Image: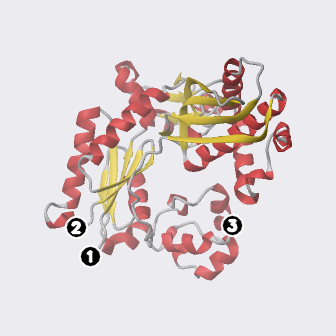
């Protein structure tokens, strides 16, 4: 039995959310982002005709489309609507994976015995739009890769069914950039040797691709040939991430404890970004030498950025630690999590800051978490 895998993608999600709350934004060029030195978090189709794209510098976007209206963005609104969409899907679909704040995969294999899979999915998409007002596109195929590519081809507000017998016919003429794992660097590498379509890539010997690209070469070859056995992972919402440290000896060394807190934040923030989470609530916990435990928390705009979280944690610690008594333990908890990559946390960021985080995360992923960090965190090893 062929699998039936659906990819659902809310069209220009941030833009659509803003238009729900303000009908005057309908039909006009719209950019979601922040700051003159920031980047585009999302943009309407009206701006895309001028060449504007997500992650583009705001200044460049405004040169291409000077008539565009810029909105800073409201992550609380986006998260709330995303949660509503997820609830609608989970009430109806047997297996749901929430891939991001605006994307879901469904495994509806076997449902065609009782109800046509494409008809069922089309009615689900219509229900989502009817109950939320949000436009959505989808594709139905035999695996996650083909269905995701299909959704991209069906946008906006489209639907597509790609049976197993038509997978190669569908994929072959498309650009290799349509494959989810192909970024600009890989695309340029492949282009230099004349590989620009998925068909040409699929006809390359897998061993040669592995030599060129590394361990991802075989996986890329499989995707080009429409092969993807990855399962739809049932969606489970993580509630929080946390860490704490109990000292070998009770301490009153504030400078060192703050360095430890910074190290904790760096570790947890990297975990958030790696697992594609954003936090909205920060909690700091301390335990005095007499075992008296206290906590203090505050709400913040959704983020996974070290510099924002470090500032918040430090301020909370200063308010919380109000006795001249030794501490035996300190800890941090980030909760109120929502799905989202750092790409959707751009409303306050500059291009330089984004590039810095991307470079640091790349080094940590390749060489280990301790490969790079703030100089002050080396003090944590003193306790």
Per the model, the C-alpha gap separating discs 2 and 1 is: 8 Å
Q: Is residue 245 left or right of residue 379?
A: left
Q: Is residue 280 left or right of residue 1?
A: right
Q: Secondary structure at mark 2?
A: loop
Q: Residue at point 20% right, 48% down?
A: 123
Question: In front here: 350 or 382?
Answer: 382
Q: Is residue 188 left or right of residue 48?
A: right
Q: Secondary structure at mark 1?
A: loop
Q: In this figure, which residue is indicated by the disc labeled 2? A: 110
Query: Which label sits in the foreground, 3 or 1?
Result: 1
Give the position of the N terminus as an image quadrant. Answer: bottom left
Residue 338 visible to the viewer: yes
Query: Pointer 2: residues within 10 angstroms few (<14), some, or many (20+)?
Result: some
Per the model, the C-alpha gap separating discs 3 and 1 is: 40 Å
Q: How many marks?
A: 3
Q: Quadrant of residue 305?
A: top right
Q: Residue at point 77% right, 31% down?
A: 258
Q: In this figure, which residue is indicated by the disc labeled 3? A: 192
Q: Secondary structure at mark 3?
A: helix
Image mark for residue 159: none
Q: In this figure, which residue is indicated by the disc labeled 1? A: 1
């Amino acid at each position: 039995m062929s699998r039936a895998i659906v990819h659902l993608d809310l069209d220009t999600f941030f833009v659509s959310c803003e238009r729900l709350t303000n009908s005057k934004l309908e039909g006009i060029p719209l950019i979601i982002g922040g700051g003159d030195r920031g980047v585009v978090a999302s943009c309407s189709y009206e701006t895309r005709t001028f060449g504007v794209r997500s992650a583009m510098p705001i200044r460049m976007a405004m040169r291409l489309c000077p008539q565009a209206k810029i909105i800073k963005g409201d992550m609380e609104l986006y998260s709330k609507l995303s949660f509503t969409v997820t609830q609608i899907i989970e009430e109806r679909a047997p297996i749901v994976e929430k891939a991001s704040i605006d994307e879901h995969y469904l495994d509806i294999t076997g449902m065609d015995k009782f109800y046509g899979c494409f008809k069922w999915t089309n009615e689900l998409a219509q229900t989502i739009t009817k109950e939320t007002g949000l436009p959505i596109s989808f594709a139905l195929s035999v695996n996650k890769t083909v269905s995701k590519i299909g959704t991209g081809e069906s946008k906006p507000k489209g639907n597509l069914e790609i049976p197993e017998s038509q997978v190669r016919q569908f994929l072959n003429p498309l650009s290799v950039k349509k494959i989810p794992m192909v970024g600009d660097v890989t695309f340029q590498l492949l282009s230099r040797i004349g590989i620009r379509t998925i068909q040409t890539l699929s006809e390359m010997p897998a061993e040669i691709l592995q030599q060129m690209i590394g361990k991802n070469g075989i996986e890329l070859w499989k995707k080009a040939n429409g092969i993807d056995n990855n399962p739809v992972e049932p969606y489970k919402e993580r509630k929080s991430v946390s860490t704490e440290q109990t000292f070998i000896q009770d301490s009153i060394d504030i400078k060192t404890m703050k360095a430890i807190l910074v190290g904790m934040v760096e570790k947890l923030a990297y975990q958030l970004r790696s697992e594609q989470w954003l936090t909205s609530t920060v909690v700091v916990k301390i335990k005095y030498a007499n075992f008296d435990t206290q906590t203090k928390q505050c709400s913040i705009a959704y983020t996974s950025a070290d510099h924002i979280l470090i500032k918040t944690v430090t301020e909370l610690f200063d308010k919380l630690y109000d006795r001249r008594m030794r501490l035996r333990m300190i800890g941090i908890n980030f909760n109120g999590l929502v799905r989202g990559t750092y790409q959707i946390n751009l409303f306050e960021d500059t291009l330089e800051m984004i590039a810095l985080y991307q470079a640091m995360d790349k080094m940590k992923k390749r060489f280990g978490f301790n490969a790079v960090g703030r100089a002050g965190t080396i003090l944590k090893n003193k306790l």
